[in-house]
Amino acid sequence: MDKTVTSLSELNIPPKCHACPIRHRAVCAYCEAEEFGLLERIKFYRDFEPGQEIAGAGEAVDFVGSVVTGVVKLTKGMADGRQQMVGLLFPSDFLGRPMNARLDYDAAAVTKVALCMFRRAPFEALMRRVPRLQQRLLEMTLSELDAAREWLLLLGRKTAEEKLASFLTILVRRSQLRESSEPDSGSADLELPMTRSDIAECLGLTIETVSRQFARFKKSGLIELRGPRNVHVPDVESMSALAGDY
Amino acid sequence: MDKTVTSLSELNIPPKCHACPIRHRAVCAYCEAEEFGLLERIKFYRDFEPGQEIAGAGEAVDFVGSVVTGVVKLTKGMADGRQQMVGLLFPSDFLGRPMNARLDYDAAAVTKVALCMFRRAPFEALMRRVPRLQQRLLEMTLSELDAAREWLLLLGRKTAEEKLASFLTILVRRSQLRESSEPDSGSADLELPMTRSDIAECLGLTIETVSRQFARFKKSGLIELRGPRNVHVPDVESMSALAGDY
DNA sequence: CGGCCCATTGACTATGGTCAATATAAGTGG
DNA sequence: CCACTTATATTGACCATAGTCAATGGGCCG
């Protein structure tokens, strides 16, 4: 295999949907062979480097799509530069705003990202023709709304300690979902896909506070830091308990 | 007319959808005569008193519906009693969680409330048969998600002053939408539908801080308080400027 | 008139932010 | 592969914003 090809999209040959790694969880999850044919006709792939902007607030964005690999952050900014993350997208998550061209947040790649994209107009037309597609998007949007509401509680009421504990717990749960092979032992190894600054942006904190909380968790034995990005959680349960949820 | 009847729902006779005050903005907005017939067969009305619980977190809720009159709040709580509002529903807003019986927040009436309700199962069945219904719900859910993200920025990054300014601005805009008769003069009169405690719950603050901010706004001439619930905003623009958004 | 709920105000405190100085990791080019 | 550079992370000292606790004031209803 040619080692210079690092991503499907560089081949510029759309791979078949049925071989897609996010086939069963993305917006296309309920589609069948025939419908994949329609999707394949309007889809294209694109890669983004860490930090690269994918779309900007206020722009008229003419595409929507799915995260195939990598992590995408959605952020909102204020006039004086304050920034708040308002969404964090992992593989299979949907990116974009159907039924409204104008985006009111910025989307940027956190890690290397591969997107499976559709131009908005044909995608919306297809949605009208394929109710299964629309239904899946509705399901996903309702779930995102639930997640956003969980985040409102976090930002509005949780302490710095609870915020970081919640964050780590959520990341552990997510990674356990993906590599659902391993037996659900009490411990977990996390490779943080983001910088301290991204984490702070996420939790409504500063990098200093995030760093200090990591230090406190380390001192109390709740985590081991094998590198700034590599966190070992010996006991996920007690981490989860610190998050303050029921 | 019998003066003891204070609400349509007490008559126990479903009024016709085409005469409904929220007909053009609710989940049924895109429905046509025939579809209203189907809806009318499964709908019913119910009233709630201020403070009354409509549905509780963790419960299996077997209905969804629209707010016809009044204001409904959605809140999430933590083990130790901290509470955060995660949604505030006005007439025409949709209440409930299709495709997932279990609710993960509490819903309670803030004012007197009238709901137009559908049992979940028949409503979901109808949604599958009537794509227009599903499409409208998708639109509304996407808008709610946008609003929730605006709120994430507010809770995560705004100061107490900016939070209250944002809140008042949003209420003014909303009330201007509903009584869109008056010329959009620079000033506005607000009847707050809620207590200080509700406002604090909304903004991730305490009642004391909310009260102090009201006092500061009053002192600086940004508002006049004609009663604790009656706010006059002489210049909506400068209030909106304080909110910190672009 | 009295009681209750809600709102306001004051004094004090604590949590997390700011500013500044290192320390560590991750690239980059010789 | 190693110096050099840059980006990222940690730690400390100090401070400000909003929270806590407590007392007081004002409406509204029985």
Image (cartoon, coloured by chain):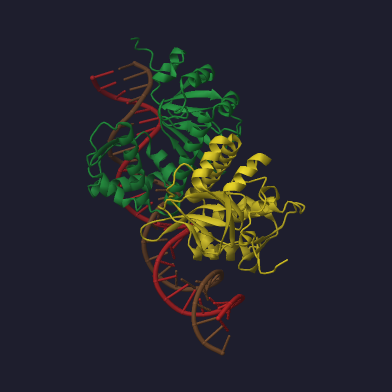
Chain colours: A green, B yellow, C brown, D red
Note whether B186 is above or below A56 in the view shown: below
Q: Residue at x 47, y 41 (%)?
A: B99
Using the rendered image of the protein, determine whether residue B33 is visible from the camera's viewpoint.
Answer: yes
Note whether B214 is above or below A176 in the view shown: below
Q: Is residue B21 left or right of residue B66?
A: right
Note whether A75 is above or below C29 in the view shown: below
| Total marks placed | 0
Q: Quadrant of the N terminus of chain A?
A: top left
Image position, residue D2 (x, y; %): 25, 22
Q: Nearer the viewer, residue D3 or A221?
A: A221
Note whether A143 is above or below B6 in the view shown: above
- Toward which corner of the image does residue B13 lie, by quadrant? bottom right
Q: Nearer the viewer, residue A51 or A153?
A: A153
Image position, residue B62 (x, y; %): 47, 50
Q: Is residue A54 left or right of residue A100?
A: left
Q: Is residue A203 left or right of residue B178?
A: left
Q: Is residue A220 left or right of residue B46?
A: left
Using the rendered image of the protein, determine whether residue B28 is visible from the camera's viewpoint.
Answer: no
Image position, residue A163 (x, y; %): 37, 49
Q: Nearer the viewer, residue A151 or A111?
A: A151
Q: Nearer the viewer, residue B205 or B127?
A: B127
Image position, residue B87 (x, y; %): 52, 51
Q: Residue at x 47, y 48 (%)?
A: B156
Q: Residue at x 66, y 48 (%)?
A: B17
